[in-house]
Amino acid sequence: MWSMSAAGAAPTNNACQAPRPANATPSTAPWLAGDGALARAALQLLATAPTHGLDPRRYGVDDLTGRLADPGGETAAFARDLDAAMVRYLCDLHGGRAAGALRVSAATDNGFDPLQRLDSARDAPTLAAAVDAAAPAIALYGRVKAMLARYRELDRLAPAWPALPPPVSSAIRPGEPYAGAAQLHERLQRLGDLDAAAAYSGDGLYAPALADALRRFQARHGLEEDAVLGPATFTALSVPPTHRIAQLALTLERLRWLPASSTPGRVIAVNVPTYRLWAFDTTDNAAAPALEMRVIVGARGRTATPLFIGSMRHLEFVPYWNVPSSIMQGEIMPKLARNAAYLQQNDMELVGADGRVLRVAASEALARLRAGGARVRQRPGPQNVLGDVKFAMPNPMNIYLHSTSAKELFGRTRRDLSHGCIRVEQPATLAQFVLADRQQWGGAQVAAAMNAGRNRTVKLATPVPVVLFYATALVDRQGRALFAQDIYGRDAALIEALGLE
């Protein structure tokens, strides 16, 4: 299965750290053998780098193309440089090109050797196959790559992407006049949310057909699906295709950071900026999501959810909440200073270093915490912030998935509200998925465990990988482009590093 690595870790694929030694002769089928067909094929492949969201300038395509036309006796140097360019391209396709703190969740993949793959290429088809095999072999990568091509074409056909005429009032509702109705009609058609054959009525109204199309647009952009032309929707409609192209290219890059799974099985993926969880069983090559649900993630700032690949190992039904030290000191102790009954009112208790509950008067609780040697935990029950079940995946950041007693928060459009852990909308269904035992852990049994009133830990028969991912552009199985706000501000630095804008 996937291995976990901490957020911020860079890949250590030794085969991709350096090209062939400078004094070595490339052992691939000679690039210039015969009429140089293999070299031309390589340059054609390098020129297609933009289809993967990569920049052909990184591989010196123009320079190499000119040198192929006029080698000037420097054939050995040309072969070495082309060889190095192809190695770099294969490495970028396989593991991404961003380095350092910009990337997350990358695991070493010692099975990938770009030199070996080049050495096996003897003609244009096998060289093209080597390039194709370097890119991630997952359906999502192919869908995003196809959407990137579509948005590049959209940008070519409509390079001018002006903001729509502003509304007279703060918002425009279906049936009301709107001076930009014709432009909105055209915009929604170009984006695919309105039937391309639909004719504009010419009446200057924000008509029901436009409202239906706008709801589809809002759904794809993580906006409230109210068909109201308000400020957030206007802003999203005004984002030019060039920026969407950059977002899609970033997703391709981030997908290249993910290590390939060595064994089929159950997988959970959470995309933080879209506040969505998907659960898959990759035993089925089609890998349609078995589950999809809304989630709540860490608030932007100090409690942002870290991105990594974890391994879920057990469930805890009717859990205690062991309050992290940072929350205890930053939130609970100040509240306790203002209200000595705070712990009692929130069904909390003090626990000593030996794990035993400390029986102290409410007036003494704060002093015991300040003196050290005591911590706070919340007892199971209706007030417990973890709800009825905790999905544990041991990691140094103490991040896990859990249910919640505040279920009304799932109705919000923006859901970066937690201290870093991930609250799931359908905990009982997720529990059945990861336990993977229909007889012992069917719906009734899971419900009984969640309502038993006593704490119980259940070890999973097989650990389940949990991928905490970050992509502001995705493509669903219906071929719809989905865009989200960059809630943690991660896109800008990566766009700059990759030279996408």
Image: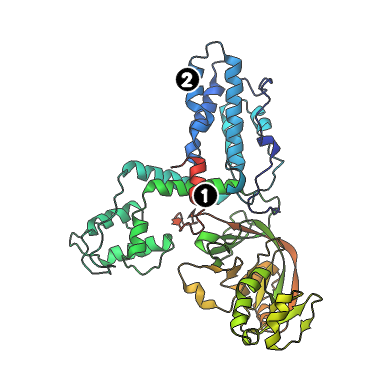
- Which quadrant holds the N terminus? bottom right
Outermost residue on the right side: it is: 354
Q: Which residue is mark 2?
A: 66
Kindly identify which numbered label has been placed on residue 251.
1
Residue found 68% across the figure and 70% down from its top: 325
Q: N-terminal of the two: label 2 or label 1? A: 2
From this view, report whether residue 51 is shown above or below residue 44: below
Quarter of the figure with residue 303:
bottom right
Position in image of residue 90 (x %, y %): 60, 35
> Which one is in front, 231 or 197?
231
Say whether residue 162 is left or right of residue 67: left
User: In terms of image quadrants, where is residue 26?
Assistant: top right
* Whole-number angstrom distance, CA of label 2 to CA of label 1: 32 Å
Residue type (three-letter) at the residue carrying disc 2? Gly
Closest to the observer, 427 or 369: 369
The relative height of residue 89 versus residue 73 in the rendered view (above or below) is: below
Which residue occupies the extreme top position in the image? Answer: 73
Residue 383 pos. (x, y %): 61, 83
> Relative to 101, is 348 above or below?
below
Pick out the residue farthest to the left: 203
Residue type at mark 1 is Thr
Circle 1: is it few (<14), some (14-19), or many (20+) Cα within 10 Å? many
